Image (cartoon, grey):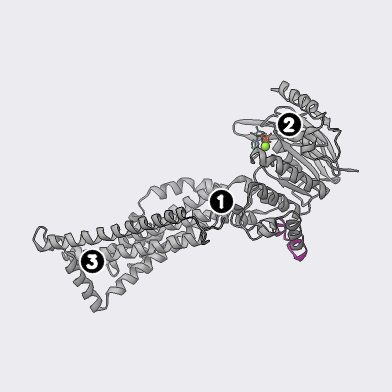
Amino acid sequence: MSDKKSPNISPQHREYLRRVKRRKRTIFITQISLLILFFALWEVAARIGAIDPFITSQPTRIIDTVLNLYRDGKLFNHIAITCVETILGFIFGTLIGILVAIILWWSEFLEKVMEPYLVVLNSLPKIALGPIFIVWIGAGPSAIVVIAMTISVVVTILEVLNGFLGVDQEKIKLVKTFGANRVQILTKVVLPSSLPVMVNALKVSVGLSWVGVIVGEFLVSKAGLGYLIVYGGQVFQLDLVMASVIILSIAAFLMYRMVAWIEKLVVKRN
Amino acid sequence: MSYVVEVCKLGMKYHSLNGEIDALKNINFSVSEGEFISIVGPSGCGKSTLLSLIAGLIVPTTGGVFVEGKPVSETSEKVGYMLQKDHLFEWRTIYQNVILGPEIRGTLNAETKEYALKLLDTYGLLEFKDKYPSQLSGGMRQRAALIRTLVAKPEILLLDEAFSALDYQTRLAVTEDIYSIIKKEGKTAILVTHDISEGISMADRVIVLSKRPATIKKIYEIKLSCEKRTPLRSREAPEFREYFNKIWKELDVNV
Ligand SMILES: Nc1ncnc2c1ncn2[C@@H]1O[C@H](COP(=O)(O)OP(=O)(O)OP(=O)(O)O)[C@@H](O)[C@H]1O
Ligand SMILES: [Mg+2]
């Protein structure tokens, strides 16, 4: 069974493992090369005048912009604001979503009552509620977090509730034969067997939370990467826009990896 | 009263928007201590319903069930239920799976833990106690599921198609295995099965149910001339074929 690490694997198997490893490396190298090629072409095209750097910007100018922001001491401030808003958005979205899903699982009556409302909320573009939250809460980070949370919470409720209702009835019957009450059914069967579903909802939430935060920053226009993008656009500084978008991509990528790592940690069994 | 289980004029109707489903009708039988009963019947006739009623998972429409003379109104530790699949929880180790019953009933203490380990040891799963279910073979998983049921110290075991998820070879071995454990622990057992041979091979009596609404068609006392009965030896007894043919015809006429 556990022959993964044993030293006495056959040469054929070792050869196979080596091939897999090599292939993985080739894929990684190609990915990096593509990225470098893209930026190099962009730079060259701008230098020889094939594209107008005033509207397309160019890598060296982007680097300058980032360095300038850094020297002003604002760079990490903007990044941190956006990241914290996003993290708060998806954490609240996921927690509240799971909590509501538990309540709806608990009461079938409530679930049936809420069903049409959830359907409407789900199909409604939640961004449309942005101005309302800004009026209610004030133009600041709190409103942005609420916007991000609102976007992710409805999907989380629906996904997690679906997962809860899809739990094998026979498993529930099994714990019932041991006299389990509803709380025990929830904690011993429903929650643990829905763990993969919940982590998956978290993954979706992260993506949606980014959307909410960036749009929120567009609306509030005070700080953060979303603000830099919208500001750069307004003053026609494409260097700033591009720099912010690239930083945003890196941040989003890193956060996705973090969640994937959490997923691996949590969903080892199941 | 010397009967462990008494089923009296039991009837069960399910209600749904599509109408009323008459699942059981006037079922009467009694089971003595240590007896092994098999229940066979056409699919969908209400066999699982019958076991759920004995276990106290659902409430009958008419009649009642008595376990050790007391009417059944809710689940009790006296009755252990084994389902078709082992339903070991993948997120728990074998040991954690096996102590699920006491954990839920709030009776988990040094004594029950000790007992769980003893059972694991007796039935050869002690070295797997910290493994996860996915690391065990189908037969071992079924055995772990039986131990999970036994840890709650039930007097009566209900087995609902408990072996049908296994392939034939494993199934024969597991049947042999589980049968000897049940006999060794001196438990009373009621087995529901589709498989007539399996039913006869384990049972002291076979109850044949009619199609829905299930009523008792006939009860066969299984008397085999073989010593030291085990399911496999039973299959070789000269009377085995006779019983098989009778029960098979009984079920067939019904279709
Ligand atoms: N909760 C329920 N609500 C409504 N009808 C039900 C319910 N449970 C079972 N039934 C119906 O009652 C009948 C008997 O079901 P049951 O599961 O007891 O049969 P069974 O003999 O165990 O079937 P199988 O051979 O498939 O295991 C079936 O027609 C089934 O559709
Ligand atoms: Mg059944």
Q: Is residue A220 visible?
A: no
**Mark 2 within 8 Å of ligand 1, using the beta carbon:** no
Report the image quarter containing ligand 1. Answer: top right
Which contiguous range is marked in magenta?
B101-112
- Per the image, the residue denoted by label 2 is B196
Q: Which quarter of the figure has residue B201?
A: top right
- Per the image, the residue denoted by label 1 is A105
Per the picture, the main secondary structure of the magenta-coloured stretch is helix
Question: Which structural element holds mark 1?
Answer: helix
B158 or B138: nearer the eye?
Answer: B138
- Per the image, the residue denoted by label 3 is A243
B159 or A13: nearer the eye?
Answer: A13
Mark 3 vs mark 1, CA separation in Å: 45 Å
Amino acid on which the number 1 mark rests in the picture = Trp
Dot 1: chain letter: A
Q: Is A63 left, or right, of B170 in this rendering?
A: left
A195 or A8: nearer the eye?
Answer: A8
Classify mark 3: residues with Cα within 10 Å, few (<14), some (14-19) or many (20+): many
Q: Is A110 left, or right, of B78 in this rendering?
A: left
Question: Which structural element holds mark 2?
Answer: helix
Residue A213 picture location, percent across and down: 34, 62
